[in-house]
Amino acid sequence: MSPNDLTIVAAGERLRAGDLTAVELLEATLDRAHRTEAQLHAYLTIDRDGALEAAAAADADLAKGVDRGPLQGIPMALKDNMCTRGVETTASSQILSGYRPPYDATVVTRLRDAGAVIVGKTNLDEFAMGSSTENSGYGATYNPWDISRVPGGSSGGSAAAVSAGSALCALGSDTGGSIRQPASLSGIVGMKPTYGTVSRYGLIAFASSLDQIGPLSRSVTDAAVTLATIWGHDPRDATSYAGDYPDPSAELGRGIDGMRIGVVSELAGEGYEPAVESAVSSMVESLAEAGAEIVELSLPTFEIALSAYYLIAPAEASANLARFDGIRYGHRADGSSTETLMARTRAEGFGPEVTRRILLGTYALSAGYYDAFYGQAQRVRAAIQDDFARAYEQVDALVSPTSPTVAFPAGARVDDPLAMYLSDICTIPSNLSGHPAISVPIGVDGQNLPIGFQVMAPALGETTLFRVAAEVERLAAFTARPVLEEVAS
Amino acid sequence: MSFPTGFLHFPAMPIDIDIAHVARLARLDLTDDELEVYRAQLGVILDHAAKVQSLQGEPQVASAHPLGFVNAYRDDVVVPSLDRDEVLAAAPETEDGYFVAPPALETG
Amino acid sequence: MTWEPVIGIEVHAELSTRSKMFCGCAVEFGAEPNTNVCPVCLGLPGALPVPNRQAIEWIMAIGLALDCQVAPMSVFHRKNYFYADLPKNYQISQFDVPVCSEGHLDISVDGATRTIGIERAHMEEDTGKSTHVGDGGRIHAAQSTLLDFNRSGVPLVEIVSKPDIRSAAESRAYAQELRAVVAELGVSDARLEEGSIRFDANVSVRPEGAEEYGTKVEIKNMNSFRSLERAVEFEIARQIEVLESGGEVIQETRHWDEEAEVTHSMRTKEGSSDYRYFTEPDLVPMVMDDTWIARVRDGLPELPAARRSRYVSDGLDPHLAGVLSDMSGSLRSIYDDAVAAGAPSRQTANWVTGEVNAWVRRTESDMVPITGAQLAELVAMVEDGTVSSSAAKEVLEGVLSGEGGPRAVAEARDLTQISDTSELVAAVESVLAENPDAIESFRSGETKVVGFLVGQVMRATQGKADPKLVNDLLRNKLSG
């Protein structure tokens, strides 16, 4: 096995044992990227020089016995909506073409402090709006399992890179499923932490009350150790959790004997691909056999979660994206007045999905429609939070498919926004509640396309979440890897 | 490919959208053809989104923070600002330390 | 028909915190452009606001000073509109749950006191500054706009009155009183000329006795109390003229033109504004519990209104009480200490607001080197005739120059009056002996000649005689 296909934990052992250097690990990773990028287009920017410098520093530290923790010397990829000082950061939008932020996002600082090696910036749906990574202003990303298919989105570049071995681990952002859904479609682990536990400072906002950064990795343990590195209170994010943080790894490997696990009846049935449903059902059976008590639960508000989401997220986005106006940075169109200049800049700089959501959000907030749309969506959000609260009185964790379908063909949903939006039907409720959730690969369908299994837990219930996820991973024994025809780019 | 029927079939409610007004509020200079495409798409999406109105029971108000956190402040302490050259380097047009924009409204 | 003006005033006060509302950039007037900026106040992608605790406590203080309710829980909203000097193209402001609401402020015009209701006071952030180049002050004639974001994100408190104001003079009185309160709290520089406090007025008129309000016009760009008064005055007259000539007042925003002394309609954009307010998701609610509110309340200084009524109860007339109240804190404490030491209030206040204040202004001194006890002593020396009023000014000068206490200065400078009758009798007699003609004149009824004789005695005593005593002695001798 090439070292770039290792898990973080396995690579860390070899780095510390001295039979692998961080520079070697990085070179292998860059080599894989070199041979797969032409087909996948997972990366928008590869920062070869910065990565080599960080890898050399990690080697020097390790040689001196300075241990910065599990991410030291690990090649990682960052979704391109996280600001990196001096390194182009575009959120896949033409409106930010060439933009180099004057500061690092808090997660980037944390990764650097932990000795991680940042390989580059990965592709996404423009401003993280999408479920296929086809809405990028710089071209789509494709799925390593089948390059005629999408990797999911919006963190599709991060998912494809980890899946293909051009990073050991990546950070994504999840607003309505943008970490978990691409992880599911790309056969890797993707985790959305409790809202407020990972700083959003330096994350280019899509929908502030929903956005959360989290890891995409090859194993549940890798996700847990990455989370432990990036999370924590940040005084620069007023929504950041300031209390005690649990240890995500505390109960890994403990099994699930005696736990109560809820199956959400609304997240099944018509519209779910049979292969997905059957894989999920057999995993639920395996969990029961492993000692969990399975509880069927109805959470009726989940039926309208998607509707609420597609009002709240665009509304917040319409304001968050107002700052892209051609005045202080980014693309600027001609215009003889500020008003004209701004309107042209934005029409030229934003792609169709972003334009659509800005219009949608503007409409939902506008005079005369606010109460019926945005206001009512907020009440639905509160009701969903209540439904979750009732569920967690009965169970320790909830499970469901991550996505109703496996990876779909590129282009299949591009012209049907609503069909695309339905990709996130299982993941959205946890964003609206702010709760943690994870997708773990549990198998493949008849076309060798991966299927993901979602575990959800209460706020700050990461220890439980990872405990259950680790058991799912063990029971699934998922070892399949994408077979990618490598060609030099 | 099919989707859960519950999400696609429900009584449509007529939604009037003054798309040109919305685009002007959002500062998006779109052509008439583009406006028409977006108006139609928004109609479909809003039709679906209108399902939020089916929520029964007592009206509730979502907390401003999903987990109900309150009171996050910073102390009144000055920290160094950015270097002006670095800030202005990202700008499309500058002059004597200022960002430059055209006049607010059309002249003429 | 008689028309009744109905006026509401919106005040924007920049708080004088060290750092901005949502970031650590310095709040500094007059810095080089774009030097106090960071990702947050420039609206760079990914930046997040974190509120300044001091600013929140200061708006609470303003609210408490205006007898407002402080909301137990308050939230920030986004107010969405595009403008080149608004970096995020939304302003973090407050909408339906402001920090403070339902207060009032008493004002006094021509001796009559009126209570003006305060609708609300809310917290927001200031915008950057646009300079319209090649414009001559008119936005629509500008060739380009220079943008400086140093002011962007400076904490701003907006205080909105109820439509309780009924005249231009009341508008001015309200604005001045509110400025005095904010200045007293020490939460804002409150300088009109620097724009750290700004006033907009909503003016309408209605027939006297009508219940309904007329159409209101917002007037802006008044940079002094005088221009506020003039602008309101102009606008009232303009609206009455429009109505009396059968026209209709249009709801609009008008600019006060300082030179022409008229209001101009500002060119309005097509379509009405729609701010699409919604809760700011980057911030969490502010919970202001009783303990916090009580702590802020305990820290409030004595406010101008309370101070003025205390001075009136000391025995000052309302005018003098007002003048003294507007003096600096160090001058006022000299008054307070002197009165506490037993000095008569009116004379003490006259000294403080007159000579002492004049000295401070002349020397531009930060310190006032006289204690209340020393001023009390000086006032007493005038009262008992130890020094004349004019000599007392010299004594004060000496005290303020560090020459010592009043008595020591009076003696060192030889300014004490001769109040010893026997010494003066001699001087009077010798003057009378030298001026027999004057005695003649007096006795033939020309009593005015006494003034001349007093002058002669004063000259003979080098001005040290108590003129009142000299006058009495002369009259005695002449009529005797």
Image (cartoon, helix red, strand yellow):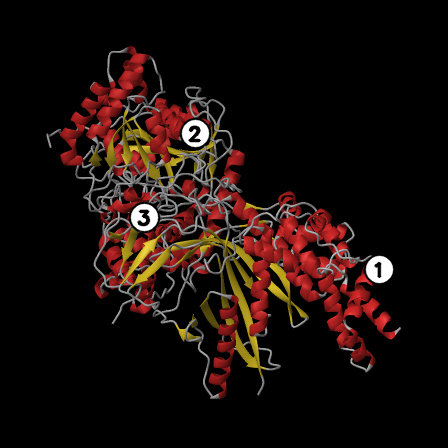
- Rendered location of residue C227, percent (x, y): 49, 70
Q: How many labels were placed on the picture? A: 3
Q: Nearer the viewer, residue A412 or C165?
A: C165
Tag 1 residue: C421
Which residue corresponds to the image point at 33% horizontal and 46% vertical from the top-left? Answer: C44
The amino acid pointed to by label 3 is Tyr
Tag 2 residue: A465
Tag 3 residue: A421
- Residue A19 vs C336, above or below: the answer is above
> In the rendered structure, the residue with mark 3 lies on which chain?
A
Q: Nearer the viewer, residue A141 or A167?
A: A167
The amino acid pointed to by label 1 is Thr
Q: Label 1's element?
A: helix
- Rendered location of residue C257, percent (x, y): 42, 72
Q: Residues within 10 Å of mark 1 (few under 14, many from 20)?
A: some
The amino acid pointed to by label 2 is Leu
Q: Nearer the viewer, residue A102 or A88?
A: A102
Q: Residues within 10 Å of mark 3 (few under 14, many from 20)?
A: some
- Residue A261 vs C391, above or below: the answer is above
Closer mark to the observer between disc 1 and disc 2? 1
Q: Is residue C161 left or right of residue B43?
A: right
